[in-house]
Amino acid sequence: MTNVRQRIYSLDWLRAIAIVLVLCLHASHTFHDTPTSLKWLVSSGWAGVDLFFVLSGFLIGRQAFKAQESGKSKWKELGLFWTKRWFRTVPLYFAVLFLYVYIKPLFGQPFKQWNWGFLVFLQNYTGIFDMDHTWSLSIEEQFYFVFPLLLFLTPLGRLRKLWILPLFISVFYRFLVWREYGFVDLTISEAARSIHFLTHTHMDGIACGLFLAATYDIWKNYGSRLKQALVFLGLAVSIPTMLLTGVKLHGIGNLLTFPLLSIGYSALIVGTYGWGSDGRLFRCVQKIALWSYGLYLWNTPILGFLKRLDGKFHWSVNWLIFFLISLLVSAITYYLIEEVFLKLRNKVLRLIDKQKVP
């Protein structure tokens, strides 16, 4: 976590909201006595992932664009960028993956259809039938690899506002998928395997985040009234889109759900940017945001082991156990794995920065 990251209170709130949405959705699928009304309310929790995409595109875009202006060697900046991202995301991922592949069978739950894609973050294309929540991490990691190559080593790096184009590319590919299915509603499985999980059909959020990063110097000076209007606009666009879509893409929603969510979330980021916060509630929110990567990786494996609780206790007790264990495990692995590698990363970054690159 960088100092800049710690100071942007509103982004911590949005990150915490995003992970809580995802956790609630997964819990409602696991504990079947969850009230129907609550299941409906959290059925769009998957849209929390799209909020992560916009946040990631914005934060990573800001870092990369600043690096582009540093005057350092492009190859050095490329090395610094990849070091920052992969020391942040790879260690915990492989720790969870290792435990899931080798520990899960000891509990009578063998890993389903292992393939090499899990080793290089291509499982969203090579086949993902277990740890399927990592489809979104695959998209992120592919973005981390391709984006800096294009930014630092091609003329596209000077055309920042064009980074919105992947949104339209994804809409086009989703249209092709929808046409292939005969312009009918897709089942949940069809939507997941042919639209949700694939990078080229789901770049909307990252594209909007990059566009926010590219236009930061413009909107950072917006007045309070305009920002308030953007908050209302963001809520007015994103909440109805989430509730009307659910976990299935309906009709024209095949094309418009992701861009609408991304635009709504972008408006919320701009509208709330710079909001201050303090007190105990925010410190709790900040911890959830800090541990959100661990919560994202651990929640599905934890639910796999908690399935046996389904029906034994009241649903609210099961939910509480799930959230407490998820927070505890994520906090432990943050300090034992993530923070350790972040410190190591800082040493590696200093070494790279000292290297003379022609």
Image: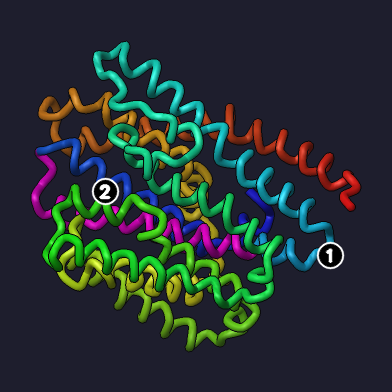
Q: Residue at x 47, y 40 (%)?
A: 121
Magenta part mainly helix, strand or loop? helix
Residue type at the position of mark 1: Gly
User: How far across and how far down the image is residue 87, in percent?
Assistant: 63, 38
To which residue does mark 1 refer? 71
- Is residue 178 shown above or below 218? above
Dot 1, how many residues are within 10 Å of its Cα: few (below 14), some (14-19), or many (20+)? few
Q: Residue at x 24, y 14 (%)?
A: 108
User: How far across and how far down the image is residue 269, in percent?
Assistant: 48, 70
Magenta span: 33-62
Q: Is residue 172 magenta?
A: no
Q: Nearer the viewer, residue 349 or 223?
A: 349
Q: Residue at x 49, y 61 (%)?
A: 55
Q: Is residue 266 left or right of residue 4?
A: left
Q: Nearer the viewer, residue 294 or 156?
A: 156
Marks 2/1 in contact by CB < 8 Å: the verdict is no
In the image, which disc is placed on residue 81?
none
To which residue does mark 2 refer? 193
Residue type at the position of mark 2: Arg
Q: Nearer the viewer, residue 92 or 183?
A: 183
- Is residue 112 shown above or below 230? above
Mark before the other along the chain sequence, 2 or 1: 1
User: How far across and how far down the image is residue 75, in percent?
Assistant: 77, 53
